[in-house]
Amino acid sequence: MTTLTRNISEVRRSNLGERQLRRRRRTWTYLAMAALAAFFLFPLVFMFVSSLKPDGQILSDSDSIRAFLPVGDISLDNYAGVFDRVPVAQFMFNSIFVTVSIVGLGLVVNSMCGFALSRLQWKGRGLVLALIIATLIIPFETIAVPMVYWVSKLPTLVFEDGLLKYDFGWLNTYQVQIIPFVANAFSIFLFTQYFSTIPKSIDEAARIDGAGWFTIYRRIIVPLSGPAFATVAILTFLPAWNSYLWPLMVVQQEELRPVMVGMQYFFQLNTAWGEVMAYTSMITLPVLVVFLAFQRAFVSSVAASGVKG
Amino acid sequence: MKRRSLPVMVSLCAASALALTACGQAGQGGGSGDGPIELTMWTHSAGNPAELEVYDKIITDFNASQDEYEVVEEAFPQGAYNDAITAAAAANDLPCLLDMDGPIMPNWAWAGYIQPLDLPASITDELLPTAVGTYQDEIYSAGYWDAALSIFARKSVLDANGIRIPTVDEPWTIDEFDAALATLQSAGYATPLDIGAEDTGEWWSYAYSPMLQSAGGDEIDRDSMLSADGALNGPEAVDFFTWFQNAFKKGWTSSAGTIGNQEFVDDEVALSYTGVWNALASIEAVGDDLLILPPPDFGTGPKIGGGSWQWGISSSCNSPEGARAYLEFSFKDEYLAEFADKQIVIPATAGAEAQSLHFKEGGDLRPFVELSQKFALARPETPAYPVISSTFEKAAKDIMNGADVQSTLDGAVQEIDANIESNDGYGF
């Protein structure tokens, strides 16, 4: 009996020790995670807080903890200043329109291309895929200037004097910001890889049932490839939203410019840092909303593709 | 499904092609040929409402004054402007009228972007010399204004430390300047001088090459424009850059501050080497105690950088005579004065100075006019300038960070000379 009691109390003690150990470990893990979260949040907090302060205070607060606290002369003046300096609503609309178009069209075009490369049997598809992948090593900056020349010569339709006419040159249009970025080698590669993992026997069964290739693509492959579509959507969204060099080169009219080009409006002889922070807060908001809305898909897609932005 | 959709698509394509063939090309026939000729005009002023306001006024007045031409303005942000011009030149889509920073003008003239300005001498002769851009003896650009650098100080601080207040006629010698910095440091200013070394890009050449020129060196041999040898790495240049390096070593100045004039306003530094554009805010903060002083004399007299944003006409302009008509119209004293007072820059004509609130005789910013007239020196008017400027910046930063002065300057000379040689001397 005494031995049994001793054993029970030893087990209790050992369970207690394990629980304490586990609790302590968990506490440290949470502390470390909280520290990391704070570390990654600091730039965002600094941005939002500074957007509420006058320039002088941003600079004087920058070497203390006050930089992260909404203290001192707090107001929305910088936001009002942004609207005086930049046509924010127009730039925001342009960026949303261009980004949504690139993502939407990109999902259709690249997935169909990936489907053709992974599911259809045709001569030279291996070579075509290799060539598409090879284009990934060419930095965009090296082909930007020839592309500007090229798009400036492309035919287009315009309305003039109430008539539909053709003309040449895509500069100063929405399509010049969208079309060149719809087909994307990396997206095609991702779709091709993902589609290859879906058993081909499904195609054969569908063909026997009388389905054409488009039906197989639309009714079978697309519904089975949610993660691939999410990955491509997110990886296309970010560079499209952050696009700067290309619109700068091909869009001269203010009413067609995207938000990132608007950033340069604040860098005059003296930089209006408060307005810079207010503007960056405003243009970061849509990205944060998209991220929070698709948080799960984003994390799983990054894990699935092994790619991060 | 495939077989059914193919004929439909072919029919659609054929119909579209037919429809397009039936349409005319835009701009051909039936157009509005009777209207005014459109003159496109690009500025670097997006995000600068004060500057745009004056441009809008000039354009509105010009368009209303005649019915032959119509100027249409498009504003770009300054940081992106040169890239936009380069891209437009590649696409043969340059505007008729464009503004440009003074030192880039020779490069754009050499590259064929712009044509000689051909404005009447009655206009260009009236402008500050540094507001007129000349390349190979031809005027390619002209500006409404110029900027000037000076040293801002508080009279009370100099008086309290027994430091002589320099004048345009009797600026500080370099020995006096060194002694003043040492005194101010002893008086409690950890870093007594803000020279804006935290800034990047063109600022380095604009702000510090005049000091080099004051010491007897230069960024290039201006007689030939073919080599920097002797100018950028000669004994005078080595002396200046040794002083420059020591100023950082001794803690007289630093590259750790923030861009702008805030440290001076907050009295964290005693002296600030900065531009006219910061003067009004400093007057508001410091009041009558503010002194606008000439830069020190490093040996051959003080120098400050000259040549700011100016107007030119593109080579591909469809109506250069219209562009000239606009520019002639725009160089009116009233516009230049308004521009100067709104933008806080020095008006380019004596008539505009007289009309300016800040720059007229007795105006609070009048000292800048004297500094500009007496000490301004344009940056080298050569197409190689963009390379010279970036090489100068890199070398000066290396020296600031402790690199060997002579070998760093020799390397910079080599780089500049190699670029000039590979471009066949840029036409010199």
Image (cartoon, rainbow, N blue to C red):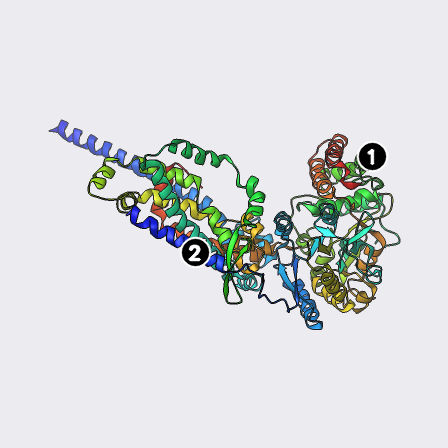
Q: Amino acid at mark 1?
A: Gly
Kindly give the residue lying farthest to the top in the view shown.
A3
Q: Nearer the viewer, residue A236 or B40?
A: B40
Q: Position of residue B2 (x, y in %)?
A: 30, 46
Classify A287 as above or below A304. Answer: below
Q: Is residue B371 visible?
A: no
Q: Nearer the viewer, residue A53 or A98?
A: A98
- Please state the chain letter of the residue tagged with numbered disc 1 in the rendered image: B
The C terminus of chain B sits in image quarter: top right
The answer to whether residue A40 is left or right of residue B418 is left
- Please state the chain letter of the residue tagged with numbered disc 2 in the rendered image: B
Q: Position of residue B297 (x, y in %)?
A: 84, 46
Classify B3 as above or below B277. Answer: above
Q: Earlier in the sequence, mark 2 or mark 1?
A: 2
Q: Which mark is residue B230?
A: 1
Is the Cβ of the residue at disc 2 closer than 8 Å to that at disc 1?
A: no
The answer to whether residue B361 is left or right of residue B272 is right
The answer to whether residue B208 is left or right of residue A297 is right
Label 2: which residue?
A: B16
Q: Nearer the viewer, residue B104 or B277?
A: B104
Q: Quadrant of residue B230?
A: top right
Same chain? Circles 2 and 1 = yes
Kindly give the residue lying farthest to the left in the view shown.
A1
